[in-house]
Every structure is written in C-alpha cells, then in structure tokens.
Image: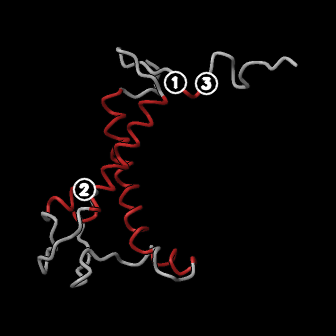
Amino acid sequence: MNPLQLPLWLIIPLLACVGAAIGRFLNICIDRFPEPDLLRDQLKSLFHPWTVCQRCGTKCSGRDHLPMIGWLLNHGRCRKCGSRITPRYPIIEAVTAVLFVIVYWRELVVGPSGSHGFGGLTSIEGPAGPEVIT
C-alpha cells in the first residue's frame, strides 16, 4: 500500500466529519447573511459569539458546536429556556456530509479491494482529451 493512501474505512468517516463541519459553517452563514448590511459587516459578524437560542440568547457550550451531535444531545431544544431549535441545522450538516462522501465516491473509483482509481479525474486520452483532427 502506498504510504499516501489511507484505508477506505478511515477516509469515509473523515470526509463526513469535514462535510458536517462545513455544513455547520454554512448554517452560520445562512443565519447571518440575509440581513441587508454591507458584506464587510456580514463577514465581521461571523466572528462574533454565536447564540443557540434566538429567544433567550444562550451562548453555545463546547458540545453545542459539534455538528449534528450538539442538536441531538439537547433534543432539539435550548438548554436554558427549552424553546425548540429548528431541525434545519442538523439537516444541512448531514446533507453536506453526505455530499462530501458521494463526490469522493463518484470521483475516485473504489475497487473491491479498497484500491483507488482515478474515476473522473483523468481520462484514457490524457489530460488534453482526444486530439482534434481538422
């Protein structure tokens, strides 16, 4: 096995975790970008503390920042006031995680032994494709 190749059982969960983390960031962007502010102000707001509950303003604890898991551990409710938190958050995180895995699976063809090919990344004709005869 090439030292740069990781086993498939390790790659898929890692990609899902990265996808879920990016989904978490997308949720923050979705919450903050619709406001009619300047783009500069919207980008600055990404670095302000993010609150879980729009009703009571409870700040996130460490476990609340875990994609999908934080929402499930709190049963979809605020820790302080008990108001419901929309299931949109874990859905977006899960869809992003699944999309990361699907793109990997489609682009790098995986054989039965777990060996990697190069699916859509290269072609038999080479990087330039078939030669055009004029």
Inter-mark Cα distance, 2 to 3: 35 Å
User: Amino acid type of disc 1?
Assistant: Gly
Determine which quarter of the picture holds residue 69.
bottom left
Say few, some or many: other residues with alpha carbon within 10 Å of mark 1 (under 14 / 14 to 19 / 20 or more): some
Give me the C-alpha separation between circle 1 and circle 2.
31 Å
Mark 3 vs mark 1, CA separation in Å: 7 Å
- What percent of the width, then of the height, locates residue 6? 40, 28
Residue at mark 3? 122
Identify the residue position indicated by label 1 in the image.
119
The tag earlier along the polypeptide, 2 or 3, is 2
- For label 1, the SS is helix
Find the residue positioned furthest to the front: 134
The image position of residue 83, as x and y in percent, is 15, 76
Is residue 39 rendered to the left or right of residue 27? right
Locate residue 76: give its quadrant: bottom left
Placement of 24 over or under 32, stated as above or below: above
Query: How would you rate the neighbour count of disc 2 (Cα within 10 Å): few for under 14, some for 14-19, many for 20 or more?
Result: many
Circle number at residue 68 = 2
Helix, strand or loop for disc 3: loop
The image shows residue 70, relative to residue 17, as above or below, that is: below
Q: Quadrant of the C terminus?
A: top right
Labels 1 and 2: the sequence-earlier one = 2
